[in-house]
């Protein structure tokens, strides 16, 4: 009988691993829980010590199995398609920011209403932009006044700093 309890316990661990690798929205987890309960009941039928060992084993082995599953998932081909990659390096982001700096001073047309964020077209290139707080209609001509990281700030053409009220 203890062999059946061990087999159920191992099947439960396999189902936990399957839940991590192939999400079943809880189906494998419920089946794994049933296996753990079944193995514990069978072990308690043999002796209370065996039952206690199965409970302790479940509390120790399940988290380890979950961590192992996530580690395997990161290294598998399926996991690489499912999970996000590492964040971009600061050097790669700096290249993107340098590329955006070329837009400073360029004029373009607001493709969408800028309330205050939206999209503008600069020579056929659509770019996500933000105004300095103004709400502008689509079709309005804008100029890039600043690039702050990945944030491209525009203002309507014809408006200068002198136009701002104190």
Image (tube, rainbow, N blue to C red):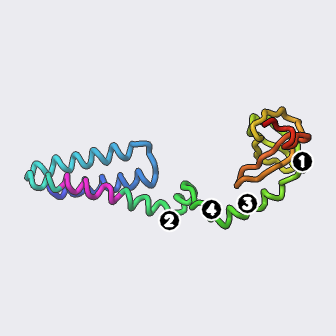
How far apart marks 2 and 1 lie (CA) works out to 46 Å
Query: Magenta stretch mostly in which secondary structure?
Result: helix
Which residue was labeled with disc 1?
Answer: 107
Which residue was labeled with disc 2?
Answer: 75
At mark 2, the secondary structure is helix
Kindly identify the residue that appears in the image at 88 percent across and 36 percent down. Answer: 139
How far apart marks 3 and 1 lie (CA) works out to 20 Å
Task: Classify mark 2: residues with Cα within 10 Å, few (<14), some (14-19) or many (20+).
Answer: few
Left or right of residue 122: residue 62: left
Q: Nearer the viewer, residue 66 or 44?
A: 66
Q: Quadrant of the C terminus?
A: top right
Residue stretch rendered in magenta on the structure: 54-65
Which residue was labeled with disc 3?
Answer: 96
Q: Are marks 3 and 4 in contact (CB under 8 Å)?
A: yes
Q: Nearer the viewer, residue 77 or 4?
A: 77
How far apart marks 2 and 4 lie (CA) works out to 19 Å
């Amino acid at each position: 009988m203890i062999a059946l309890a061990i087999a159920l316990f191992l099947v439960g661990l396999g189902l936990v691993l399957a839940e991590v690798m192939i999400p079943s929205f809880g189906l494998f987890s419920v089946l794994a829980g049933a296996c753990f309960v079944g193995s514990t009941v069978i072990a308690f039928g043999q002796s209370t010590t065996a039952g206690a060992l199965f409970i302790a084993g479940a509390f120790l082995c399940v988290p380890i199995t979950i961590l192992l599953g996530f580690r395997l998932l990161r290294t598998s081909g399926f996991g690489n398609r499912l999970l996000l990659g590492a964040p971009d390096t600061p050097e790669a982001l700096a290249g993107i920011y340098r590329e955006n700096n070329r837009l400073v001073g360029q004029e373009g047309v607001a493709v969408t209403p800028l309330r205050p964020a939206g999209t503008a077209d600069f020579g056929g290139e659509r770019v996500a932009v933000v105004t300095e707080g103004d709400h502008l209609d689509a079709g309005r001509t804008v100029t890039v006044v600043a690039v702050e990281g990945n944030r491209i700030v525009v203002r309507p053409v014809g408006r200068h700093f002198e136009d701002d009220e104190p």
